[in-house]
Image (spheres, rainbow, N blue to C red):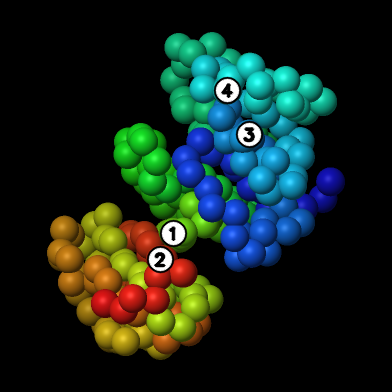
Amino acid sequence: MTSTTFTILLGGPLNVTDRVREMLAGSRIIAADSGMRHAQALGLEPELWVGDFDSSDEALLARWPQVERQPFPPAKNETDGEIATSEAIARGATRLIFAGALAGERSDHALQHLLSAVSLAERGLDVFLTSGDEEAAPLLPGTRVLDLPKGSLFSVLGFSDLEGLDLRNVRYPLNDFSLPFGSSRTVSNVAEGQVEFSLKAGRAIVLARPYDLTGA
């Protein structure tokens, strides 16, 4: 296979919407442990299944005997998701989609996925995260455009002080704005369609709710 877009199936919840299906079309798939349960709902067969398999039950293991597995011991230095990510990069990934990356029972895992996404973006990878109900994308110095439904909610969460932040085609635009680390000023904005983000310095995550049209 020649695609350089890889989807990592993670263990968090995933609402399989038309938007998710369209996003994953043509992507190569690697499952991380119990993230494999999303494969059937998506109608996709991963090329690889990695992890310690401590959260995959016998029924799930029996359902996919044909998929190549890379087992790891439970006592390891990386999460199953990080192992799957490293394997995708080794196979030529330039774009990474993390499905099942947000919410769920383990907030530590969800937060780690956001931090990891920013780190991967700093290495030059195009990164996107989704649960179907929520989406996230790293925001680094430069310009990024996200195609969000008109009226949908989104927030910009700074992982540092932000300098020169511009938000265009939104209900509450900003121009060359300085956002102190920890400020809630950029929580709950509303997309007017395709949103353009620009940043001069800092690192952040855009967290969007494409099906939430309740306004801010």
Q: Are marks 3 and 1 in contact (CB under 8 Å)?
A: no
Q: Are marks 2 and 4 in contact (CB under 8 Å)?
A: no
Q: Which residue is mark 4?
A: 56
Q: Which quadrant would residue 18 be assigned to in this image? A: bottom right
Q: Are marks 1 and 2 in contact (CB under 8 Å)?
A: yes
Q: Are marks 4 and 3 in contact (CB under 8 Å)?
A: yes
Q: In the displayed image of the protein, which residue is found farthest to the front?
A: 59
Residue at image coords 47%, 27%: 79
Q: Mark 4 Cα within 10 Å, few/some/many (few <14, many 20+)?
A: some
Helix, strand, or loop for circle 2?
strand
Amino acid tagged 2 = Ala
Residue 158 at x, y percent in the picture = 27, 60
Q: Which residue is mark 3?
A: 36
Q: Which residue is mark 2?
A: 208
**Marked residue nearer the N-terminal end (3 or 1):** 3
Residue 92 at x, y percent in the picture = 71, 45
Cα separation between marks 2 and 4? 29 Å
178 to the left or right of 68: left
Amino acid tagged 3 = Met
